[in-house]
Image (cartoon, helix red, strand yellow):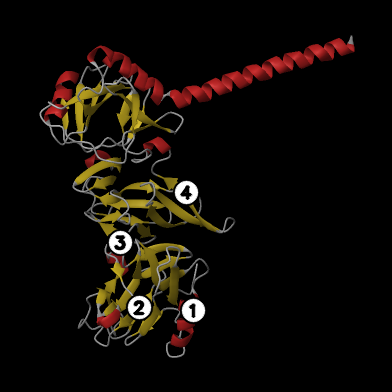
C-alpha cells in the first residue's frame, strides 16, 4: 500500500490542524493529493478523528481508493481495521489531482475536487452547525450545533453494517457495494412482517433468506444489542430476536459483499480480529451465487455446469455468466428437465394445482422466463410451479423430495428420442463430483484393508 503522498501532505496539514480524538471544528479543511498515474493497488487514508476507547476503537478517515480505473474519494468510519461506514457507498465521488474535506463556516460538510467541484455533502448549510464534526463512542459520525443537538448523523445513512446500539426503522435496508464489474448486489431489508435478504439484478429481486416473528406480528424497527438483533413492535416491545451464539458482546452486523451472507461479529482478543458468532447461511449451497448461472451446487459443495446435447450429438457445457431468456411463444425453445434440483431463490410468481407440462408451457410462452421450478408434495399431492428469469441459485436435493427444475433451451438442443437419456446423463454429471469422491474413499479404504491383512499375514509367518 502506497501512503507516501498522504503522509507527506498530512504532516504539513497537522501544522495548522491538530489531530483530534473526538472531532474537528467549523472551518476545518484537509486536502490529500491524488496520484497522477493510476495504480490499481493504491489505497490511502488520512485519519482525522478517533474515539477515546480501548482498541479496537472508531476512527474517521479521508480515503482515496483505486476503483474501476479511477480514484474514488470518500469519508469513512473504521472500527479497528473494519470499514463500517462510507460516504461513497451508494454514489462514488471520482476525482483527480486532489480531494478536499471541509466543514464550511455555515455548517456544511463537503468533499471537493479541482475547480471547487463538490462531490458529496451533508446538506446542513444554514442549520445551525456551529460546533464540530465528531465521532461518538457508538461509531455514529455526527454534526452538532452549539447546544450539542445532532443536525446530521451517519446512522441515518446505513450502508452494509449495523453497529451495536444502531436502530433501523421498517422499510430501511442495508446493501452491498454496487460495483461496475458485477451485475448483482445483495440487500438486507427490514419489512413489516420479516427481515429478509435479497439478490438484486436490475429490476429483478429474489429473496434467499428470511426471519419472521411468531404470530404474524408486525415490525416497527430493529436494533443491534450486545446479544443479537432485536425486533420491536409499534409499542417499543421486543417481539423477536436473532441471537448471538457466543458469549462475547457483539460489535456489529455485516452484510458480506462477496457472498451475500450476513453475520453478527464480536472482537476476539485472542485472535486479534473480529469473529462471527452467528451467520444466517452456514452451507455453501445455501448462498444465492454459490455457482455461476447455469451451475448446480452439489452435495460436495462443488459446482457442476448444466450439460446440453447439440444436434450434432456432442456434449456441451452451458455455465456462462450471461442471463437467459428471449425465447418467445415456445417456437424457438424447449424445456430441459433436471430431476432432484431446486433453487434457493424465492419471491417469484407461483401457480398451484398445475401439471408439470402446463408449468413448462407457461415458461415457454413467456419471453422473459428462463426456467421453472416444479414441486409436487407426495403426501398432499399439491403441485406448485415457480417461474424464473435467471438460471441461478441451483442446488442438488435428495431423491424423492418432489423437485424438478426445467431449463429453457434452444429447440433442437436434444433430439426427441434422446431426451430421456439426456435428463439422466445431466443428473449423473451433476452428481459426478460426489460419486468420484465416494469412489476414492471406498477404493482407498479397500487398499488400506488389503495392505493391513498382508502385513498381519507376514507378521504371523515371521513369528511361526
Q: Earlier in the sequence, mark 1 or mark 4?
A: 1
Q: Dot 2, crowdedness within 10 Å: few (<14), some or many (≥20)? A: few
Q: Is residue 137 above or below residue 204?
A: below
Q: CA distance from mark 3 to mark 4?
A: 22 Å
* Label 2, label 3: how far apart the Cα atoms are: 29 Å
In the foreground, 72 or 69? 69
Q: Are marks 3 and 1 in contact (CB under 8 Å)?
A: no
Q: Residues under labels 3 and 1: Cα distance? A: 30 Å
Question: Residue under circle 2?
Answer: 97
The answer to whether one can see residue 188 in this image is yes
In this view, the mark in front (1 or 2): 2
> 216 or 39: which is nearer to us?
39
Q: Nearer the viewer, mark 3 or mark 1?
A: 1
In which quadrant is the C terminus drawn? Answer: top right
Q: Earlier in the sequence, mark 2 or mark 4?
A: 2
Instruction: Identify the residue under disc 1.
Output: 7
319 on left or right of 451: left
Q: Crowding near pointer 4: few (<14 within 10 Å), some, many (20+)?
A: many
**Crowdedness near tag 1: few (<14), some (14–19) or many (≥20) residues, C-alpha within 10 Å:** some
Comparing labels 1 and 4, the label whose residue is closer to the camera: 1
Is residue 121 shown to the viewer in this render?
A: no
User: Is 155 situated left or right of 139 in this image?
Assistant: left
Residue topped by disc 4: 277
Provide residue 440's location: percent of width, then percent of height: 56, 23
Amino acid at each position: 500500500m502506497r501512503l507516501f503522498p498522504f503522509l507527506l501532505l498530512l504532516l504539513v496539514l497537522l501544522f495548522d490542524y491538530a489531530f483530534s480524538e473526538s472531532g474537528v471544528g467549523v472551518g476545518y479543511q484537509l486536502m490529500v493529493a491524488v496520484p497522477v498515474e493510476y495504480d490499481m493497488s493504491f489505497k490511502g487514508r488520512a485519519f482525522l478523528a478517533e474515539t477515546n476507547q480501548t482498541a479496537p476503537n472508531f476512527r474517521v478517515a479521508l480515503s482515496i481508493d483505486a476503483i474501476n480505473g479511477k480514484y474514488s474519494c470518500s469519508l469513512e468510519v473504521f472500527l479497528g481495521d473494519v470499514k463500517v461506514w462510507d460516504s461513497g457507498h451508494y454514489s462514488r465521488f471520482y476525482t483527480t489531482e486532489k480531494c478536499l474535506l471541509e466543514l464550511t463556516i455555515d455548517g456544511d460538510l463537503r468533499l471537493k475536487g479541482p475547480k471547487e467541484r463538490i462531490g458529496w455533502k451533508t446538506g446542513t448549510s444554514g442549520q445551525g452547525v456551529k460546533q464540530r464534526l465528531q465521532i461518538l463512542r457508538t461509531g455514529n459520525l455526527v454534526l452538532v450545533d452549539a447546544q450539542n443537538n445532532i443536525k446530521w448523523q451517519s446512522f441515518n445513512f446505513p450502508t452494509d453494517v449495523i453497529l451495536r446500539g444502531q436502530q433501523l426503522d421498517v422499510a430501511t435496508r442495508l446493501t452491498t457495494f454496487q460495483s461496475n464489474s458485477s451485475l448483482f448486489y445483495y440487500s438486507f431489508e427490514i419489512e413489516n412482517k420479516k427481515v429478509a435478504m435479497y439478490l438484486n439484478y436490475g429490476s429483478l429481486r429474489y429473496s434467499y433468506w428470511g426471519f419472521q416473528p411468531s404470530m404474524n406480528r408486525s415490525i416497527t424497527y430493529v436494533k443491534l444489542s450486545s446479544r443479537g438483533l432485536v425486533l420491536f413492535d409499534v409499542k417499543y416491545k421486543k417481539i423477536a430476536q436473532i441471537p448471538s451464539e457466543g458469549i462475547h458482546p457483539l460489535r456489529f452486523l455485516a452484510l458480506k459483499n462477496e457472498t451475500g451472507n450476513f453475520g453478527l461479529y464480536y472482537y476476539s482478543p485472542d485472535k486479534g480480529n473480529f469473529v462471527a458468532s452467528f451467520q444466517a447461511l452456514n452451507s455453501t449451497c445455501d448462498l444465492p451465487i454459490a455457482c455461476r448461472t447455469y451451475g448446480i451446487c452439489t452435495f460436495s459443495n462443488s459446482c457442476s455446469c448444466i450439460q446440453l446435447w447439440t444436434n450434432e450429438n456432442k456434449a456441451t457445457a452451458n455455465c456462462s455468466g450471461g442471463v437467459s431468456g428471449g425465447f418467445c411463444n415456445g417456437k424457438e425453445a424447449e424445456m430441459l428437465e433436471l430431476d432432484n434440483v431446486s433453487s434457493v431463490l424465492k419471491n417469484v410468481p407461483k401457480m398451484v394445482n398445475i401439471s408439470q407440462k402446463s408449468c413448462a408451457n407457461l415458461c415457454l410462452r413467456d419471453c422473459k422466463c428462463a426456467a421453472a421450478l416444479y414441486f409436487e408434495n407426495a403426501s398432499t399431492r399439491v403441485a406448485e410451479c415457480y417461474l424464473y428469469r435467471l438460471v441461478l441459485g441451483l442446488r442438488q436435493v435428495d431423491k424423492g423430495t418432489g423437485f424438478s427444475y426445467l431449463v429453457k433451451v434452444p429447440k433442437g438442443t436434444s433430439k426427441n428420442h434422446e431426451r430421456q437419456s439426456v435428463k439422466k446423463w445431466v443428473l449423473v454429471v451433476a452428481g459426478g463430483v460426489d460419486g468420484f469422491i465416494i469412489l476414492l474413499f471406498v477404493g482407498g479404504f479397500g487398499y488400506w484393508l488389503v495392505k493391513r491383512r498382508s502385513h498381519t499375514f507376514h507378521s504371523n509367518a515371521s513369528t511361526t
